[in-house]
Amino acid sequence: MSESEKIKEALETVNIRISSIYDLVNTSQSYSEAVPVLINLLNEGIEDKRLHEGVVRSLAVKEAKGMAAPALIKDFFKTSKEDVSLRWAIGSSIEVVITKSEVEDVLRIVQDKQNGRSRQMFVLSLGKFKSNATIEDTLITLLQDDDVALHAIKALRKLRSKKAIPEIKRLYNHSNKVVRQLAEETVEFLNRKT
């Protein structure tokens, strides 16, 4: 049995019929009953990269919050550092499903520069946790890391971090125009907030 057929068969056990895992990725319908099945498939391992990424992306739903993150983080650490797009997709799903329980693992991921650009969405996910000095300080440090600076600015903006303003201002002369613009807009936004 092919991996694609295995995925279809597993989902049929919870009355979900698909022609491809990307049917779930691209639907606006809720499929909470599929979440445990998808987590189990991820834990068992999927060799085909496209199918693997499809399962990862299909877990980027609010119904997976509080359930999928541990399996996704484990999958991130199992995935080769060279597979940046899959690791990035895992971070994108984490950004949707992260809870306080995963913050320590996510901090470890974002502080490891060897994880490169695959950290971007993990960095963004940290913007969901207000009043956490460790997160705020980590994000401020990451402003100096070109791989994730843009996402660090966005996360600090979500946190409404006044403490970050001096460091964000340093990015006004950044080589990347998008980083420069977002830095200026963010400082303006933060200065307006009381």
Image (cartoon, rainbow, N blue to C red):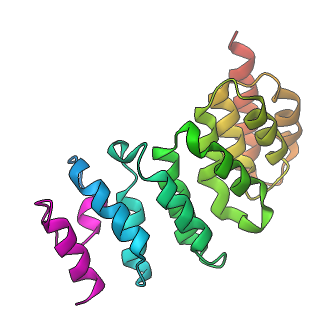
Where is residue 60? Give x, y as percent: 40, 52
Q: Is residue 155 visible?
A: yes
Answer whether residue 65 is magenta in the image: no
Identify the residue at image location x=71%, y=43%: 152
Quadrant into which the C terminus falls:
top right
Q: In terms of depth relative to the viewer, which is nearer, 175 or 142?
A: 142
Image-based side of 158 in relation to 38, left or right:
right
- Total residue callouts: 0
Span of residues in magenta: 1-25
Q: Nearer the viewer, residue 30 or 68?
A: 68
> Image check: 142 left or right of 35?
right
Q: Is residue 132 above or below residue 53?
A: above
As displayed, is residue 158 above or below residue 12? above
Answer left or right for 26 relative to 133.
left
Q: Determine which quarter of the picture holds residue 37.
A: bottom left
**170 or 34: nearer the viewer:** 34
The outermost residue toward the bottom is: 1
Q: Using the rendered view, name the quadrant where residue 8 is placed.
A: bottom left
Residue 31 visible within the image: no
Residue at x 70%, y 33% (from the top left corner) = 156
| View extreme (top): residue | 194
Q: Is residue 11 magenta?
A: yes
Residue found 87% across the figure and 44% down from its top: 173
Image position of 166 (left or right of 119): right
Residue 73 percent across, percent down from the top left:
56, 59
Residue at 26% over, 60% down? 24
Q: Position of residue 1 (x, y in %)?
A: 22, 90
Give the answer, above or below, for where 188 lies relative to 105: above
